[in-house]
Image (tube, rainbow, N blue to C red):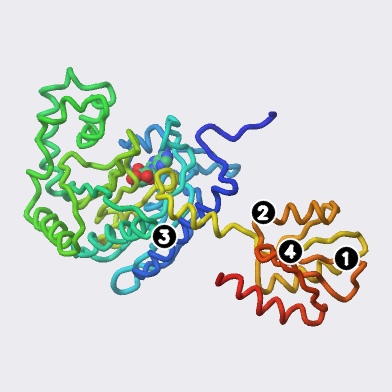
Amino acid sequence: MKYARPRGTQDILPPDVFVWRRVESVFDETFESFGYEPVRTPVFESTDLFLRSVGEGTDIVSKEMYTFTDRGGRSLTLRPENTASVIRAYLESGMHRRAGTTRVSYIGPMFRYDRPQAGRYRQFHQVGVEAIGTLDPSIDVEVIDVVMSGLERLGFSGLDVRINSVGCRVCRAAYGVILRRALGAVKDELCSDCAERAKRNPMRVFDCKHCTGLTGDLPRISDHLCDECGAHFEKVRSYLQSLGRANEHDPTLVRGLDYYTKTAFEIVHDSLGAQNALCGGGRYDDLVEQCGGPSTPAVGFSAGLERIISVLPQGITDEANAETHTDVYVACVDEVSAGRALQVAAVLRRYARVEMDVTARSLKKQLKGAEKSGVAVAVIVESASPGVVKWKDMAGRTQVEIEDERLADYAGKNLDKLKRR
Ligand code: AMP
């Protein structure tokens, strides 16, 4: 082979692509049912947007961005996540002038130059929502409810919701001093990355796989929240309880992006191993302002489709595969009839999914192919029978002749019936 796909990417081909489409449409329907409107933003943005929002001290910005200079000399970056882009679009389009909460959803590819492994790709796909404009804790809970509802509609049950509060500008700054002091006492035991994090972004130490032995004894943000953040967190947990959504307080959950404030959460699936988070999200009350807008609270989540699909319950996969079948197969036996067969297929497509055989194989072979692909009806067009087609019910093994002028009417009645069968 001369060319191979780039490392860390995937081709999504049939039949898997039908499962992908099904999962995407379940999320789309779920988002709509909560009043979220879809948005689409470019896959690249100016590099500066991510530096400022995701944060220069994060792994994403310091190690994982696909950054390039375009022919006009601009520094651009393939989006490593979508919240920053959505906020940029929200401000640029003037959506921030709307009253109340703006609810938007998205679906699309993201790019991170990460070490490829199971559940970790360089191009991966996220679905997500952002609820912009409301500080009330009920919106945090709504966002968690949206993703959980989507996952439940896909057949998942018993997923773990882990939740924490990472505080606000005020309490996090005070906690940062305490944490840095504690990290100073163990500085010789930190890995080289964490030694750097201790200076620039100390909370990220909790995410380090190498320093887990040390993090157990470090002071935790949840013991140092200001009154407002503490009360917010209590309310989020009590609303989750009212909704019957089980959740576990994980005081070491800090998330990998700088913009989070107050609520941070993850939904994990046990069977995924090291990369076990299906979804991550939280509140980011300072980001709109950081991006040049008015001070506006917001909260959102993003969930990885590759990981969701890798542990998808069987039922939804079966449903998606059942949807992939063609309903009708038009067999055309001789070249003279090809024009007529095209017309017949066009009429039938008003009612069903129709595939036409253009291989000029024998009728026997074409019908065998039709049977193998599981179609309900084969329609045979041949010059030996001008003005009529043969309508073969593959399940009942019956065959009738239908005149061309009756075909639309007959197809309307019979193909509709087939769909309900
Ligand atoms: P994050 O944007 O890092 O909070 O990630 C949100 C979700 O996106 C994670 O829970 C994963 O499901 C998914 N995700 C993040 N990075 C990757 C990756 N490199 N490959 C596949 N999925 C990813």
Q: Which residue is mark 1?
A: 382
- Asked whether 359 or 238 is in front, the reply is 359
Name the image quarter holding residue 56.
Answer: top left
Q: Which residue is mark 4?
A: 378
- Asked whether 358 or 237 is in front, the reply is 358
Q: Which residue is mark 2?
A: 373
Q: Nearer the viewer, mark 4 or mark 3?
A: 4
Dot 3 amino acid type: Phe
Crowd class of label 1 (few under 14; some 14 to 19; many from 20; radius 10 Å): many
Dot 4 amino acid type: Ala
Residue at the extreme front of the image, as rendered: 397
Q: Is residue 100 above or below residue 291?
A: below
Mark 1 and mark 3 in contact? Answer it, CB < 8 Å: no
Tell me if 289 is positioned left or right of 228 in this view.
right
Residue 58 visible to an observer of this rendering:
yes
**Separation (CA) of disc 4 from disc 3:** 35 Å
- Image quarter for ligand 1 equals top left
Q: Earlier in the sequence, mark 2 or mark 4?
A: 2
Crowd class of label 3 (few under 14; some 14 to 19; many from 20; radius 10 Å): many
Q: Earlier in the sequence, mark 4 or mark 3?
A: 3
Crowd class of label 4 (few under 14; some 14 to 19; many from 20; radius 10 Å): many
Q: Nearer the viewer, mark 3 or mark 2?
A: 2
Q: Nearer the viewer, mark 1 or mark 3?
A: 1
Name the image quarter holding residue 80.
Answer: top left
**Separation (CA) of disc 1 from disc 3:** 45 Å
Q: In the image, residue 239 lies at what x, y percent?
A: 16, 62
Residue at the location (13% across, 49% down)?
Answer: 170
